[in-house]
Amino acid sequence: MDMAIRPYRSVLYIPSSRERALEKARSLPVDAVIFDLEDAVAPAEKPAARDTLKAALAQSYGNRVRIVRINGLDTEWGEADARAADAMDCDAVLLPKVESAADLDALAALTSKPLWAMMETPKGMLAAAEIAAHPRLAGFVMGTNDLAKELNARFRADRLPMMPGIGLCLLAAKAHGVVIVDGVYNAFKDAEGLRAECEQGRDMGMDGKTLIHPAQVEVANAAFAPSGAEIDLARRQIAAFETAEKEGQGVAVVDGKIVENLHVETARRMLSRAEAIAALAQ
């Protein structure tokens, strides 16, 4: 699949020490899985979790992107995690609390896998462009819980205190063509709150949402997929513009709005994304 349109609507965290959870992930309709060796694994279980995860990844996860989140390289487990992940059948290695390109250089020396960066500190936000430009970087994961803690921010449904940092990361990701997925929504039983936050992230341009519970998958998949109305409009925009071009005109009109080449490019990209999502379901 073309990685430029590869869906990342739902990205579910799974503790790497829990065999039952690792097995269940194979049947969930998620676009990607973050296999967590960091926060979700107790210190005493971390070495064994590497072996548990390696054995699980030796079996197929279908079309799901497999990302291994290691412990920080400044911890006693980080280097061993990175070397172990390099030998696993995974698609990428995710480093927590990235604050500079040098952090990614250190990880790149330990693994040949594509790199992903957790963006979760003020220093990381301010260095987002430098980090996104790293030649091995494939994606950003927003760590909004840690960012809120670092900012000493109060919870707000609109996430206004975190918007400057989120915006910097979003701009950097788009400027350098890397995937960016939004932070988690902690109230996993609150479907309406999750839907609102997914819609906010989608409206901003996020590629998807990180999730902490399987119950959140359906909402995220729907929010980050083109709707039927959007697909219909995209098709009509393309058809109208092609007709206008044949008539020697540079613009078309659909539903009372001007359609130019840039709108057609967006429409075609949306249709390609819809086709990619449909392909995942086969």
Image: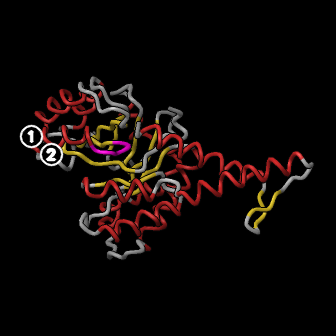
Badge 2 vs badge 1, beta-carbon distance below 8 Å: yes
On screen, residue 40 above or below 253: above
Q: Is residue 57 left or right of residue 234?
A: left
Q: Which residues are magenta?
A: 28-32
Foreground of the two, 87 or 230:
230
Foreground of the two, 128 or 1:
1
Q: Quadrant of the C terminus?
A: top left
Would you say residue 224 is visible in this rendering?
yes
Kind of residue at disc 1: Glu
On screen, residue 251 above or below 278: below
Kind of residue at disc 2: Val
The quarter holding residue 183 reads: bottom left
Q: Secondary structure at mark 1?
A: helix
The residue wearing badge 2 is 41
Residue 97, percent across and down?
Answer: 34, 50
What's the colour scheme?
secondary structure
On screen, residue 64 above or below 174: above
The Cα atoms of the two marked residues, 2 and 1, are separated by 6 Å
User: Which circle marks residue 75 in the picture?
Assistant: none
The residue wearing badge 1 is 45
For this orientation, the residue located farthest to the right is 248
Question: How dense is the environment of label 2, judged by Cα within 10 Å: few (below 14), some, or many (20 and up)?
Answer: some
Would you say residue 74 is visible in this rendering?
no
Q: Is residue 29 left or right of residue 169?
A: left
